[in-house]
Amino acid sequence: MYGFEAMTFNIHGGYLEAIVRGHRAGLLTAADYNNLCQCETLDDIKMHLSATDYGPYLQNEPSPLHTTTVVEKCTLKLVDEYKHMLCQATEPLSTFLEYITYGHMIDNVVLIVTGTLHERDVQELLEKCHPLGMFDSIATLAVAQNMRELYRLVLVDTPLAPYFSECITSEDLDDMNIEIMRNTLYKAYLEDFYKFCQKLGGATAEIMSDLLAFEADRRAVNITINSIGTELTRDDRRKLYSNFGLLYPYGHEELAVCEDIDQVRGAMEKYPPYQSIFSKLSYGESQMLDKAFYEEEVKRLCLAFEQQFHYGVFFAYMRLREQEIRNLMWISECVAQNQKSRVHDSVVFIF
């Protein structure tokens, strides 16, 4: 199939690919970020954003603004664009677009279950959930006491149901079990999405394989670093790694036995794409690792737009817009808390 997409792709996908490339042109540029970083108040940020695609979403917000309002309205724009594309999509693009939201569904499930465990109000938790990951029975997650109940009462009717087969246990839910559940679900989701993209074939398979492999490898590194010093055994750690990616299988064997950040670094430096990421960090430092991974991801996502006639652009656009919202949240928080000296610490420039 590869090479023949140009003949048939535009029959069903041409309009939406044009739409998503148009949306991409509306992403904030380095000049926009430099202007935003100079802002003194959240109203200055609103004024600058009024000249961008976010303008209509923020124009009726009264002063004083809050960071949560800025993030909420920017996310609403992303959700509106996503829903428009999903309404227009036909198979297999509609299924591909639905796969993009499953990660948010997993995060929402974990957020509700963790919040309930700490006796937080369900309504308050629902407000914090990502709108792309909502499903009908999400509020009833609060009644579950263990994984089996969680599955039987709520999740059996959601798209996440197949991913739960690996983590159904009768153990009561506690913080450790919930984190293991999150990572097991993510592993099953990424592997399923990867298989789906392989089945589509062509440029979509090629580009999405690279993007999903990077996501799987990043999660493997984060799982390793976060589990150092916990009671998670090496075998349990290895079970949480996805069965594909550049690190699979030999890198996973090395990561499973790492005891500190420098050993993780040693394992990762054998892989040229990740060597450049770790070379930006000083030894023993892991705080800036997230930003380094985000920068590498943004580079790869931008490259997805260099090729035509594939579905990778939809995934890339959604991820770039989410990164942009993270940037705006960080800038808004720094301005609101009068910490402008730290404003460049976490901003990842997209263009």
Image (cartoon, grey):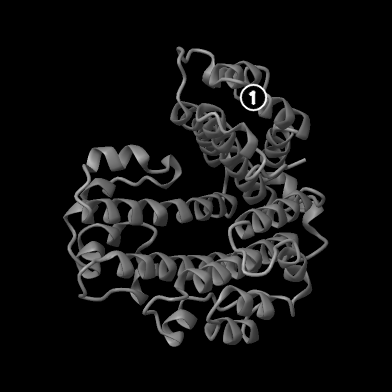
Q: Position of residue 342 (x, y in %)?
A: 62, 39
Q: Which of 214 and 228 is in front in this view?
A: 228
Judging from the image, what secondary structure is the residue with disc 1 in? Answer: loop
Image quarter hosting the C terminus: top right
Q: Out of 237 and 3, give the one closest to the viewer.
A: 237
Q: Is residue 161 left or right of residue 116?
A: right
Left or right: 75, with 170 as reference point: right
* Residue 231, position as x, y percentages in the image: 36, 79
Residue drawn at x 28%, y 62% as measured from the top left: 156
**Above-or-below relation of 80 to 194:** above
Question: Is 260 situated left or right of 158 in this image?
Answer: right
* Quadrant in which residue 2 is drawn: bottom right
User: Is 265 above or below relative to 348?
Assistant: below
| Kind of residue at disc 1 | Asp
Tally the marks. Answer: 1
Question: Which residue corresponds to mark 1?
Answer: 53
Q: Is residue 102 above or below residue 172?
A: above
The image position of residue 311, as x and y in percent, is 67, 52
**Quarter of the rendering occupied by the N terminus:** bottom right
- Mark 1 neighbour density, 10 Å: few (under 14) some (14–19) many (20 or more): some
Left or right relative to 26: residue 99: left
